[in-house]
Amino acid sequence: MTATYDSTFKRSIREPDAFWGEAAENCHWYKRWDKVLDDANRPFYRWFSGGEINTCYNALDLHVANGRGEQTALIYDSPVTGVVQSYTYQQLTETVARFAGLLASQGVSKGDRILIYMPMISEAAVAMLACARIGAIHSVVFGGFAAKELAVRIDDAKPKVVVSASCGIEVNRVISYKPLLDEAIRLAFHKPGTCIIFQRPEEKAALVSGRDIDWADAMVSAHPHECVPMSATDPAYILYTSGTTGVPKGVVRDIGGHIVALKWSMKAIYDVDPGDVYWAASDIGWVVGHSYIIYAPLFQGCTTILFEGKPVGTPDAGAFWRVIADHRVKTLFTAPTAFRAIKREDPKGEFLGKYDLARFQSLFLAGERTDPDTLKWAEEKLWVPVIDHWWQTETGWAIAANCMGIEKLPVKEGSPSKPAPGWNLQVVDLNAQPVRAGEIGALVVKLPLPPGSLPTLWKNDEGYVKTYLEEFPGFYKTADAGFIDEDGYVFVMSRTDDIINVAGHRLSTGAMEEILTDHPDVAEAAVLGVDDTLKGQIPVGFLVLNAGVDRNHGDIVREVIQMVRERIGPVASFKVATVVNRLPKTRSGKILRGTIRKIANNEPYNTPATIDDPAVLDEMAVALANIGYAAGKNS
Ligand code: COA
Ligand code: AMP
């Protein structure tokens, strides 16, 4: 009998040991696990304890051993430099083994941290896989972050080595990475011993004598290194993500669960087989890049694509279709914002006519809710299933998805379908009690979380419990609110914290507020995520100035915008702020963010009963109108 979604899901919850044990049989182990699910130290559940395994072996060497050595493993396609470069599994294994040898020659071994600050070039993938090969824990930092953010991550992860490149290329601008790295190391308390720098032809970086090594020079004499057997419960990587303050959270992924869950997901969720071409158009600095540019497609023996370009402007709105056609892509995974950008430039989809998309079979979207307009446009133009799926940096793979390799369920607009196998998702009220179908509440996952999700935060078990497990005992708090309808479809409505989603990137408004209030003229500030037709949301800042400040408001606004760019980075997309006399607050002093957001989004709103002074809402409406936001009506 073929498995249905229902039977697969139920089995994954009722018999997790049998379910994930079977999935693990498809991976290469040096030593079999003692226990599939180890719950000896609750709430710190561990998967495959006692097992020994290596991430890089499962991503590369295994396929060479199984006769896939000549198949293309990785295609680097860079419209910004005009380079397209392919590696077979054999070639990628050899390059990674040599880079692993280079790391080892710098004294790197099991458990050491390596920080990777790289643009979207093949060397970034090589560096990640080389860390995995020798059991070093990588922490990749997205290129759009500023030196200060990089410094915070250096201080938390304490890397022995940093791997970086001279520059990145944003459409047609060269972004110098090396000065950002130098500045970050200057700011950080922890000083990495070595920096390995890949010099790109577009810009050569000055190297610091005694600390910096040129990638290409060092690779000449590097000796290949074998894969090191690792404990399944050892950390594979740390990926920092925005928390509710300026201090990012170091999400840890363990080795065994990560391999098992991701390999399983390729068939079950994406319906992708070995030999298929799979493309996640994201960045290696994000979780999507970790899971679905690098690891999962390689675990599955697919060809993966590393694209250094944008959906528009590199050179036009046909870039995605060109890549799909050139490399015979079966499955594309990206964020809805990329499709909104394409749709805005080419509403009729005229570029599609120029390319042969015969092999293209499905589009997966995540990072933010897929709005019905984007869903319909993509379905109409592409003629393939368009699948919204919901996940988080913490979870590593989809919490809810239409599992195309198990059973394709009917699509409901606005819903990422049903919980994926392994995720016992529930909706609860503030007392952790289940609510009725269709009622909005907190989306929580009953413990244990499935393999591949976070076992803890880096060196911060207490923070893990406090952030995710304390509020709803027995559950993991996703910090998303939503509901599950009568048919079991999940609807993710909003975050319950101060995180906003800008172009599929997760940002903390709290972190931005901390920066704004650092400005000497600013007494108080609020930053809110306001709807944006391209990026989903953009941050908008409201500044209350110190008494007596009589400087030009425009100058102060420009200065705070620059401060956010310098401290968080261009990725924050913080470009709009305004000065107000006061912020609307409750009588107990809480800023009424929900109401301000409604005004800015031109939605009807009610004056909250707890408001300190209702007149302030009219003042906000005027302030918003001054910066181009049609203010909502007080209903
Ligand atoms: N290095 C340095 N700077 C970077 C960068 C990087 N790796 N990535 C982005 N930036 C900069 C951009 O140049 C831009 O700078 P600017 O303010 O000087 O123009 C800023 O950070 C904001 O970038 P972004 O949010 O990507 O906006 P954009 O206007 O350049 O592009 C989209 C908008 C929609 C085309 C783009 O966000 C996109 O392709 N998103 C979909 C794919 C995706 O990344 N998904 C992530 C999760 S799946
Ligand atoms: P990140 O950790 O950057 O992947 O961001 C995770 C957050 O993005 C989630 O908690 C959601 O708020 C949002 N998100 C991601 N995917 C979806 C989706 N398909 N639908 C709705 N929200 C999503």
Image (cartoon, grey):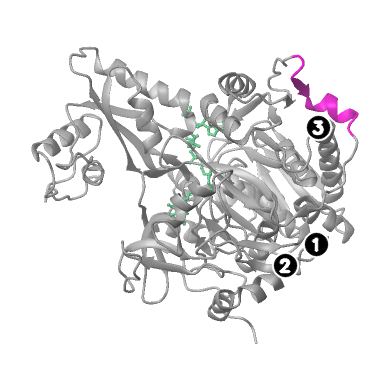
Which callout, 1 or 3, points at the residue further toward the start of the chain?
Answer: 1
| Nearest the eye: 519 or 111 | 111
Residue 116 falls inside the magenta stretch:
no
Mark 3 vs ligand 1: CB below 8 Å = no
Q: Secondary structure at mark 1?
A: loop
Q: Secondary structure at mark 3?
A: loop
Measured as percent of width and height from the top left, residue 543 is found at 26, 27
State the residue at coordinates (31%, 21%): 557
Q: Given the image, on which type of amino acid does mark 2 rest?
A: Ala
Residue position for label 2 = 24
Measured as percent of width and height from the top left, residue 224 is found at 89, 40
Which callout, 1 or 2, points at the residue further toward the start of the chain?
Answer: 2
Q: CA distance from mark 1 to mark 2?
A: 9 Å
State the residue at coordinates (57%, 54%): 454
Residue position for label 3 = 107
Q: CA distance from mark 3 to mark 2?
A: 32 Å
Horizontal side of residue 80 vs 633, given as left or right: right
| Nearest the eye: 588 or 168 | 588
Residue position for label 1 = 29
Highlighted magenta segment, given as a residue range: 209-222
